[in-house]
Amino acid sequence: MIPAAYAVLNMAAVAHNLQKVREYAPDAKIMAVIKANAYGHGALRIAHTLAAEVDGFAVARVDEGVRLRNSGVQKRIAVLEGFTCAEELDKLLAYQLDAVVHSFAQLAIFETRTEREEIAVWLKFDTGMNRLGFKAGELQDVYSRLMCCSIIKQPINLMTHLANADDKHDDMTLKQITLFNDTLASFKLEPNSERSIANSAGILAWQQAVTEWVRPGIMLYGISPFAELTGEQLGLKPIMSLHSRLIAVKRIAKGDTVGYGGSWRCEQDTTLGVVAIGYADGYPRYARVGTPVLVNGQRVSLIGRVSMDMITVDLGSQSNAKAGDAVTLWGEGLPVEEIALCANTIPYTLVCGVTQRVKQIESGVKQL
Ligand SMILES: *Cc1c(COP(=O)(O)O)cnc(C)c1O
């Protein structure tokens, strides 16, 4: 029997996608970004699959890093949001996690500490994202002050984050890269300091962003960072496929409405299928009518509103389908990028949003 609402994780695709990172950044060290439970794919399973092959990991929060360490991950782990108080810094120390340093408040905490060379840091340079980091004019002073903090291991690495690298026509990216390079060239860095600029879009579209370290996230999961291209078109393979099954099939007559709000009205007699997946599983509430769904491998269209536990589809050409038949919501054979466009969102939110209720099943041989 096909279960309701489950995600298959093709672990063989992990190695394939990592290989793509290497093609674009053959000499760079790889910091695999596995924040937010590896974008919904399971941080521990992705970390342990990649551990022997990458140079480090990045997570957003301290507790995400702690969880990885507790599971036996030994590679360096950078916490992208760093720490906000002394207690959190203590946790970074206890678990040997790297801190991203982006604020004067963090700097002030470091300056009160007397430990010796306990923590590796990534100095975050805000080159235009205007989220975390120090401005160009502040950087030299902050760098010198960090160099004087006994608790910090040398060398201090530098990083920045690109705001719009997924738009190949926006010159903002080159401006950010130039500001990064020019500012660093204007003061004396330790010779073995390393730099990191590129996320997935940077790796794929901006060779100039590839420095000593790259930070791929979405592309590792086989998903494109670009709205106009799918992962498949980039030679990537999706790891996650989201599946469920039909739980009812029925005929509805011309003029009938379907679902909450009665917002969808049948223009002709139709065979309707009810699928056991809804927004409580992470299927997007705002997927529009016509969003493709695979029933027995064939495309049909979403109709009516997405509800908590179910969606409805016009079975169209699949009118012989029956309760129990296989349904794919995205993944192999149906790019998540396409579903994201239909739901007026980005694929990141879809994979991150798959909920606890969805059973996760690994498939494929881990080829690492
Ligand atoms: C999330 C994140 C990344 C990875 O971005 P992708 O677009 O998923 O490749 C890299 N760097 C930072 C600072 C991030 O927050």
Image: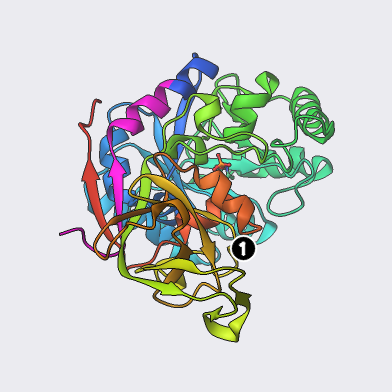
In x, y percent, where is residue 312? 46, 69
Where is residue 150? Give x, y as percent.
Answer: 51, 44
| Residue at 56% from the left image edge and 44% from the top image edge | 337
Judged from the image, the quadrant occupied by ligand 1 is top right
User: Is residue 9 within the magenta segment?
Assistant: yes
Magenta span of residues: 1-19
Q: Residues within 10 Å of mark 1 (few under 14, many from 20)?
A: some
Left or right: 241 with respect to 365?
A: right
Q: Quadrant of residue 84?
A: bottom right
SS of the residue at dot 1?
Answer: loop
Q: Nearer the viewer, residue 8 or 262?
A: 262
Q: Is residue 283 above or below residue 132?
A: below
Residue 57, position in %: x, y?
41, 40
Q: Is mark 1 within 8 Å of ligand 1?
A: no
From the viewer's perspective, is residue 115 above or below residue 30? below
Q: Which residue is rendered at x = 39% and y = 40% of the image?
A: 332
Q: Is residue 70 visible?
A: yes
Q: Can residue 25 be seen at all in this image of the molecule?
A: no
269 or 148, nearer to the observer: 269
Residue 365 at x, y percent in the picture: 20, 31
Residue 182 shown left or right of residue 304 in the figure? right
Query: How many numbered markers are drawn?
Result: 1
Q: Which residue of the protein is positioned furthest toward the bottom in this rendering?
A: 261
Residue 368 among magenta residues? no
Based on the displayed image, in which of its 4 quarters is residue 205 positioned?
A: top right
Q: Which residue is tagged 1?
A: 288
Q: Residue at (41%, 38%) from the top-left corner?
A: 238
